[in-house]
Amino acid sequence: MNVRRRLISGSAIAAVTALGLGTLSACSDSSAASGDTGKFDVVASFYPMAYLAERIGGDHVHVTTLTSPGQEPHDLEISPRQIGGLERSDAVLYLKGLQPSVDKAVDQSPVKTKIDAATLTTLEEHGTEVGGHATEHEDEHAGHDHEGENGKDPHIWLDPVRYAEVAQGVGRAFEKADPDHAADYKRNTAALVKQLNALNTDFKEGLAHTRSKVFITTHAAFGYLAERYGLTEEAISGLDPESEPSGARVRELQKLAKADGVSTVFYETLVSDKTAKTVAGDAGLKTDVLDPIEGITKKSRGQDYLAVQRANLKALQSALESK
């Protein structure tokens, strides 16, 4: 599958400076430190990991997340208070390679159960043109933290199949670490995997017949999703959210849009839409949201992962003119 991807630079992500623990639901606590809650205390690195912990753990877990709602997870710097909470927890669930400060804290932590989602499924390199030619800004993005270890793309949660594989691995880890509730973890995992399988079917069927197979994004996060469903992602590269894209890149996108029948430039809720609107205006295209689901906020098109993914599907179907 020809999945064209261009990574954006670190400056192209709008960071929210507030640190602290984010709230997910009733069993997440933004103020209480992890540990000694009477439950299986899990620290999750950011929303997709916390969602798994809550769904699989159910009533038996107390989940805290290191990334606040609305905060761009790639730029997270952990506070001393968060490190203390991590050290008192029963387990940590994270995605190695996505958040360097989390990786360092986990490596130095005495937590017995360390669950790295990156080891529970397969990661691929999406930093260069799969079809043959490398990105224009290869040197500029060397070592960029949008790539995981060894240049692997960390955005596995946007592929329902890979996300289900991670869920199964998390379930097994919970069963081993908290055997008294193993039966419940197993049951909860099975229920979640069933929903993710249904989501995969909806994407597969919903995107099987479209007028175009190419979509443009400001955030190079959808390579796995594109691969899974026979699509091609083009991501705007090397741009600050508040800056104007280069004339050369706009012309390139105009040619691409015309050749591949692209109608829409996608942007995300945690980053300014200025760049997307600039490209879209110059190319005569529309703009819409394609959410990488790195956090749930009031602007999200849904209250949880499944709802936002279904909103993403609708947006893709509209942009690609599903038949």
Image (tube, rainbow, N blue to C red):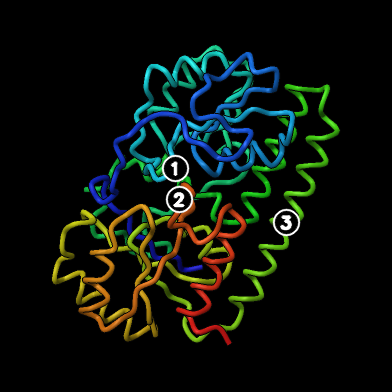
Q: Amino acid at mark 3?
A: Gln
Judge by depth and name the residue closer to the eye, 262 or 317: 317
Comparing 268 with 246, the one in front is 268
Q: Disc 2, disc 1: CB below 8 Å?
A: yes
Number of marks: 3
- Label 3 vs 1, first from the N-terminus: 1
> 54 or 126, which is in the foreground?
54
Q: Is residue 158 left or right of 140 when viewed as pictured?
A: right
Q: Which mark is residue 69?
A: 1
The amino acid marked with disc number 1 is: Pro
* Residue 230 image-quadrant placement: bottom right
User: Helix, strand, or loop for circle 2?
Assistant: loop
Location of residue 82 with respect to 8 vertically, above or below: above
Q: Earlier in the sequence, mark 2 or mark 1?
A: 1
Q: What element does badge 1 sit on?
A: loop
* Image vertical order of residue 312 relative to residue 172, above or below: below
Q: Residues within 10 Å of mark 3 (few under 14, many from 20)?
A: some
Residue carrying label 3: 195
